[in-house]
Image: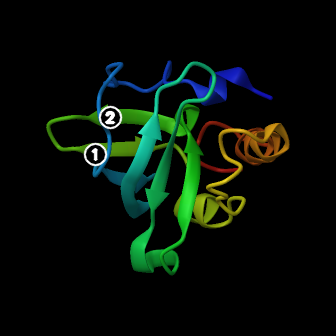
Amino acid sequence: MSSGLWGYEGAEGYAVGTDLTGYRVEATDGHIGKVDRHTDLVDSSHIVVDTGPWIFGREVLLPAGTIARVDAAEETVWVDRTRDEVKNSPEFDKDKHTDDPEYRRQVSDYYTDGYTGDGKL
C-alpha cells in the first residue's frame, strides 16, 4: 500500500486540523460533490465525498494523497483525478474504510495503479 497516498503531504494549502467538512470538491474536469467527513490520522488520512445526484447520492472515499489543493477561503478541495476516475472508484464501505486492510489495499491499488499524475489512469 502506498503510505503517501494516505497523507496530506502533497495538498497545497492544507493545514493540519482544518475541518474540511462541507467543502466543495472539484475534480480535474468539474464538480464532484461535498466533503461529508474527513480525517487527518497518520497513514489513514482521507475524505469521504457525498456526490449528491451526480452519481445517485453515492459516497466515495478519496485518500488524502489525491488532494492537490485546499482553499480555506473558498472552502474548496481540488483533487487530481477526473470525474470518471472518482465515479468508477471502489464502492465506499462505511464499515470497512478504517478497519479493513484489504479494503484499504483495494482503494490504494485503484488510485495508484497506472496513475500518471495528470489526472488520468
The colour style of the image is: rainbow
Q: Is residue 29 above or below residue 96?
A: below
Q: Amino acid at mark 1?
A: Thr
Q: Residue furthest right?
A: 102
Q: Position of residue 2 (x, y in %)?
A: 75, 26
Q: Position of residue 3 (x, y in %)?
A: 70, 22
Classify mark 1: helix, strand or loop: strand
Classed neighbour count for the residue bearing mark 1: other residues with Cα under 10 Å, few (<14), some (14–19), many (≥20): some
Image quarter hosting the N terminus:
top right
Q: Amino acid at mark 2?
A: Val
Disc assigned to residue 76: 1
Q: Name the residue that disc number 2 marks.
A: 70
The span from disc 2 to disc 1 (Cα, nearest Å) is 6 Å
Q: Position of residue 103 (x, y in %)?
A: 79, 47
Relative placement, left or right, of 29 versus 101 is left
Q: Residue at x 76, y 48 (%)?
A: 110
Q: Residue at x 44, y 40 (%)?
A: 38
Please identify the quarter of the rendering in which residue 102 is found: top right
First of labels 2, 1 by sequence position: 2
Q: Residue at x 80, y 42 (%)?
A: 109
Q: Position of residue 68 (x, y in %)?
A: 45, 34
Return the residue nearer the eye: 111 or 39: 39
